Image: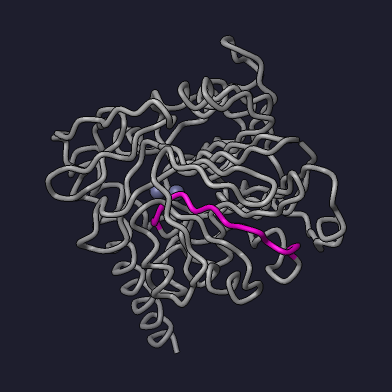
Amino acid sequence: MKFSRNLKLLVIAAISLSSFVLVYATSIDAPSQALVAEAAQSDDRIFAPARINDKRQFLNLDPERSSGSAAVRIAFMVRRFGTWFRSGADAPKRVDNDGEYLKRNRSEATITWVGHATLLVQMDGMNFLTDPIWSNTPSPVPFVGPRRWVAPGITLSALPPIDFVVISHNHFDHLDLPTLRDLAALRIETVFLVPTGNGQLLRDAGIESVREMNWGDVLTLKHVTVHCLPTQHWSKRSLTDTRKSLWASWAVTGSEKKFYFAGDTGYFSGFETIGARLGPFDLAAVPVGAYEPTEMMQGSHLNPEEAVQAALDVRAKSAVAIHYGTFDLSDEPLSDPPKRFKAAAANATTGELDGWTLNVGETRLF
Ligand SMILES: [Zn+2]
Ligand SMILES: [Zn+2]
């Protein structure tokens, strides 16, 4: 019996190893540092469409920061195995949300944290989701991959009718095909907005109502205007598609409220431009986790202090912390991101910011 238990553990470890190698090791071929293309100039849009290099890879607005030496990245991968024994005691609390209020609500602007970068937003008579993931593992292999600490704060069937979904990029913790398929099946009218180059992935999964947008593109959906905007990030889902599809943040503006979703991003100059042209925002959702090891993460993720600065740059009155405490993705202690985010917002010297950390499943008016 002991032998078969050990064998089972060995098989689990082997499957996990291949999954982690796919998710993390493939990111070792660091983004090209030679950024050659010139930005196109245009006065009638906030940002030019993203530049592409001679390998047909999308480029960031700002120069790349180092994504760490091979030694740092390999050591990080090896440490990932220790996370099987990591305690989830400091993960965010979860409150059960039965969705009844959200289904009845027609007038209040609300935000509900489902977990990770998934938010349900209600504003200007519209319901939309950001980077929806209801799966247990953000991974190409179902059931295997980084652990989910906290179950989604609301079930898919308890959601109000979703008008549209915005997706920031194709990393598995942000673009979860099983969830997108379920959402498309729940309501045929739901529109899925993705950055350029991600549409086919959804269409291949049987999702038809997909709209690709590039940085600076604007779309009106009933009562709101949706702006596709830059982030400082990258993309990869397989061994051969590094940076072949675009990454983005999204602003949703209506006559009553303005909301900004930063997606997954490092700190960059674009936040100030977004704030100057579209701000002030009533609420910004900013990612505050997955920032250690710094050498590896600084180019593509914000630490909590940078997240506060980003929210100030886009001229947000309030900012809600996302992208922490839900999946086990990085080295920092589970309790650090929300603590550091609250402290940084309270101590901000360059402006006033109401920094929110929510329970998973919690709904708050904005
Ligand atoms: Zn990402
Ligand atoms: Zn992410």
Residue situated in front as seen by the camera: 262 or 199? 199
x%, y% of residue 156?
A: 68, 68
Point 77% across, 49% down: residue:
125
Residue situated in front as seen by the camera: 153 or 339? 153
User: Which residue of the protein is positioned furthest toward the front in this rendering?
Assistant: 44
Point 70% across, 42% down: residue:
358
One can see residue 347 in this view: yes
Report whether 42 appears left or right of 221: left
Report whether 235 appears left or right of 240: right
Residue situated in front as seen by the camera: 8 or 130? 130
Which segment did they paint magenta?
A: 159-171
One can see residue 291 in this view: no
User: Which residue of the protein is positioned furthest toward the top in this rendering?
Assistant: 349
The verdict on residue 163 being magenta is yes
Residue 206 higher or lower than 164, as above or below: below
Question: What is the quadrant of the N terminus in the image?
Answer: bottom left
